[in-house]
Image (cartoon, rainbow, N blue to C red):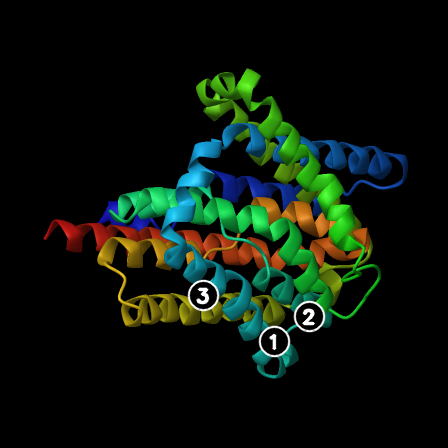
Amino acid sequence: MLRSLTKFLPSNFTLALLVTVLLATLLPTSGRGAAMFNDATVFAIGLLFFMHGAKLPRETLIAGLKHWRLHLTVLSFTYVLFPLLGWVLKPIFLPFVTPDLYIGILFLCVLPSTVQSSIAFTSIARGNVSAAVCGATASNLLGVFITPVLVGLLVVSHDGGGSWDSVLRISCQLLLPFIAGQLARHWIGAWVQRHAKVLSMVDQGSILLVVYTAFSEAIIEGLWTRMSLTTMLSLTLICCVLLGIVLFLTKFVSRKLGFNKADEITIIFCGSKKSLSSGVAMAKVLFASSMVGSIVLPLMLFHQIQLMVCAVLAERFAKRTED
């Protein structure tokens, strides 16, 4: 029973995010300090995508092309269904949150899938792990191009958000470091694999740095004074509803399309997730600094909810497979 309850507890990284937000609330950086943190976040984001490029075997990308029906299904949920839900449900959800927060919800809907947790949950549930690796990776690579375009379509230009030159800016700041990592993989790939745990700290540290910088500016702009407890609860409920709808549809559609159980599990976990690391990095590039705190807040909530729900689902799938 205690083991079951621990699934609903926040992860260490989620706790670190909460501490970072609290630190930004109590000790926000401003002036010259804010400028230094902004420069550091640009470097950290570039390093983050460089390491992603160095970690990813090219063979994995090539092998993934063979299972194109599954990948096309996952991409359809990630970049078609999710954005449509955010757009169609806007008249229902918008009265319960602020306009900036709903821009964050729309941004959440156009983000790529996660890589690490999608693969981990697929493995626990005894799904098609190789397909999960390829599908989640393809989602992240395509997201560098698709996400800025969808932001331009769904989000009206607002203090720099949604401009079409975002595609060029995000390509320069995210794609170029990724390509550099791929090119450097021949020399550093083995070292990266051996030090995966240490590099995960770099991964998480860069996200915490961006979150601290973003929330510092948002706090100075009066984020918490504009947000009531009712709004926060409404935002949490909206994230739960979005996740619930997508989980139901991924299961329903994958069965209608005739996928086997292993592939169905892969579609459920890869098609329902949104990447916190890619999202935080992209928000920093796509939106004005004063907006980033409000933009990433829905993503942070959704991230924790998806981890808790998918952990329970993964164990249930695993038990059913064993039975």
Pointers 2 and 1 in contact (C-beta within 8 Å): yes
The spot of residue 83 in percent (x, y) is 57, 69
Classify mark 3: residues with Cα within 10 Å, few (<14), some (14-19) or many (20+).
many
* Residue at (41, 45) in percent of width and height: 64
Amino acid, disc 3 = Leu
Q: Is residue 185 visible?
A: yes
Instruction: State the residue in front, 204 or 61.
Output: 61
233 relative to 184, above or below = below
Q: Is residue 224 above or below residue 155?
A: above
User: Closer to the N terminus: mark 3 or mark 1?
Assistant: 1
Regarding mark 1 in the picture, which secondary structure is present there? helix
The residue at 58%/29% (across/down) is 182
- The answer for how far apart the CA atoms under marks 3 and 1 are is 15 Å
The mark found on residue 87 in the picture is: 1
User: As shown in the figure, which amino acid type bears the numbered disc 2?
Assistant: Leu
Q: Position of residue 288 (x, y in %)?
A: 81, 54
Residue under label 2: 154
Q: Callout 2 environment at 10 Å: few (<14), some (14 to 19), or many (20+)?
A: some
Instruction: Decide: few, some or many residues near mark 1? Use Cα within 10 Å; few <14, some 14-19, many ≥20.
Output: some
Q: Is label 2 in a helix, a strand or a loop?
A: helix
Q: From this view, report whether residue 52 is shown above or below residue 88.
A: above
Picture coordinates of residue 138, whole percent (x, y): 50, 48
Q: CA distance from mark 2 to mark 1?
A: 7 Å
Instruction: State the mark number for residue 243.
Output: 3
Regarding mark 3 in the picture, which secondary structure is present there? helix
